[in-house]
Image (cartoon, rainbow, N blue to C red):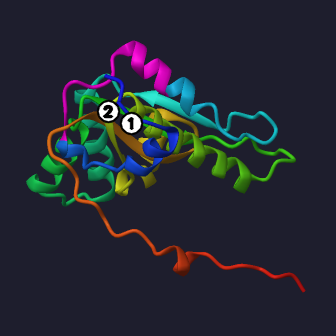
Amino acid sequence: MLNDLSSPLSLLETRRSSRPRDLVAPGPSPTELERILTIAARTPDHGKLAPWRFVEVTDRAAFAALLERAYRAANPDAGRLEIEAAHTFAHQAPTLIVVLSAPVVPHKIPVWEQELSCGAAAMNLLLAAHALGYAGGWVTGWAAFSDIVRDAFGSANDRIAGFFFLGTRSVEPEERLRPALGDILSRWPGT
């Protein structure tokens, strides 16, 4: 399902996030997903540490149960609608990848650089999915900061960088305002 993009710049100019609830089948095939994740791993990585991990969530019912358990642990008086929201979250889009920031500590490469590498890998994941004709949504929310959820996918030293939902758009996302270059660019003339 390769996009017909005339250039790499066109690819970058047209990538937009989609809401996970707007992503439907088909999602990437196993071969396409392997390619997406291989490309995601081709990221700047000072020290060649690979300070990130990818976890494909294949059992969505188990993921929903995990989210419910974690939510109830933090919110013992949770209502039916809150629990339903966690279950809905778990079942969005055909493909779900959890990206973990997994810094190597202690190490001479600062954790901050390792976290930046994880962010770059995450962006590569979205770009590779887009290049193959799929859309993606990078979501965090309460579950990304839950120790219970994190421990299901990684270790206490890891952090969930996000939940990456991949699939085919059912609706075109609205273009959002982008910052004006003049608002985010300055020039340093030296001293």
Picture layout, residue 48 above or below residue 158: above
Which label was assigned to residue 134?
2
Looking at the image, residue 190 sits to the left or right of residue 61; the answer is right
Question: Toward the viewer: 76 or 50?
Answer: 50
The image quarter in which residue 39 lies: top right
Give how far across and how far down residue 5 sits, in percent: 39, 35
**Which residue is at 54% across, 79% downward?**
182
**Which residue is at 46% across, 33% downward?**
128
Question: Toward the viewer: 151 or 96?
Answer: 96
Give how far across and how far down residue 90 sits, in percent: 25, 38
**Which residue was labeled with disc 1?**
130
Looking at the image, residue 37 sits to the left or right of residue 51; the answer is left
Q: Secondary structure at mark 1?
A: helix
**Which residue is at 19% across, 27% downward?**
25
Looking at the image, residue 57 sits to the left or right of residue 185; the answer is left
Confirm or deny contact between disc 2 and disc 1 (CB under 8 A): yes
Q: Which residues are magenta?
A: 23-36
Other residues around mark 2 within 10 Å, as few (<14) / some (14–19) / many (≥20):
many
